[in-house]
Amino acid sequence: MASEKDRRNQGAYRSEAAEAAAANRAAMAETERAAANANADAEFTANAASGFADSDAAADADASRIAELEAENADVKDRLLRLAADMENLRRRTEREIKDARTYAVTSFAREMLSVADNLRRAIEAVPAEAKEHGDDGLNALIDGIEVTERGLLGTLEKHGVKKLDPEGQRFDPHFHQAMFEVPNPEVPNNTVVQVVQAGYAIGDRVLRPAMVGVAKGGPKQGQPKPDETAEAGTPQGAA
């Protein structure tokens, strides 16, 4: 009986030992799962933190690159605007130079031809008026031929932009006239051209040769009425 009892006790002991071992293994497994979960959470947290840090770094890099590209874009735009302005100035300067070249290309030739025009005019004026009126047909034909030649020369010069200056009665302009003497004359405004000694010529807006003139002195200023006109303006109507 005792031995049977002992066997039952030993069986119960082994059963309890097996249950304890199983419980121990279950506890260890649970502990391992808890540790694994803790490690996973820690790794996730670390990865998330690293991801946030990488995102911030990437955002900073993108912002820096954008600022760099904007600066380059502004520099390129500024250079293009400057280049466009330079090209526009070059175009205008080229057009002006071409226009001046066309207008003033004959300046030297025209200046040389002025002496020919002067000689023709001197030849015409050298013939006395009486000789013109009572001269024979040959002399009159010669004079007519010289006058026709002079008109043709002046017409050809005018086609190329050369114009004759005949400023008698005009206000003296130092850019186109050269005063040779003064003529006392209170009847005309001061600095009025009253005599042309030698005709002048201009090409375009430039003077080719200034006109040699005599100007009035002693008269009223330009734009002011004459003394007799002032007196007439002050006379009451009906006064004799």
Image (cartoon, rainbow, N blue to C red):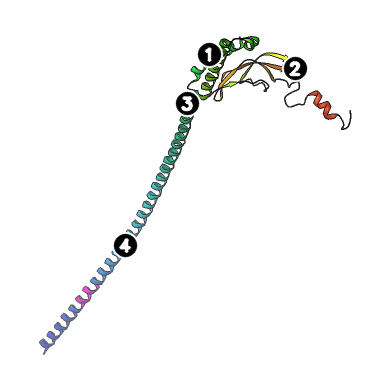
Image quadrant where one finds the N terminus: bottom left
- In this view of the protein, which residue sits in the foreground, 211 or 50? 211
Mark earlier in primary sequence (4, 2): 4
Mark earlier in primary sequence (4, 1): 4
**Residue 185's mark?**
2
Mark earlier in primary sequence (1, 2): 1
Give the CA distance from mark 1 to mark 2. Answer: 34 Å
Q: Where 128 sits versus 66, above or below?
A: above
Tag 4: residue type? Phe
Q: Where 200 sits versus 231, above or below?
A: above
**Residue 124's mark?**
none
Tag 3: residue type? Arg
Structural crowding at the residue carrying mark 3, measured as other residues with C-alpha within 10 Å and reported as few (<14), some (14–19) or many (≥20): few
Mark 4: secondary structure? helix
Q: Quadrant of residue 26?
A: bottom left
Tag 1: residue type? Val
**Residue 102's mark?**
3
Give the CA distance from mark 4 to mark 1. Answer: 107 Å
Mark earlier in primary sequence (3, 1): 3
Tell me whether the residue at label 4 lies in contact with that at label 1, contact meaning CB atoms closer than 8 angstroms: no
Mark earlier in primary sequence (3, 2): 3
Mark 1: secondary structure? helix
Give the CA distance from mark 3 to mark 1. Answer: 23 Å
- In this view of the protein, which residue sits in the foreground, 231 or 128? 128
Q: Which residues are magenta?
A: 20-27
Q: Which residue is mark 1?
A: 116
Image quadrant where one finds the C terminus: top right
Nearer the viewer's eye, disc 3 or disc 1?
1
Q: Which residue is mark 4?
A: 44
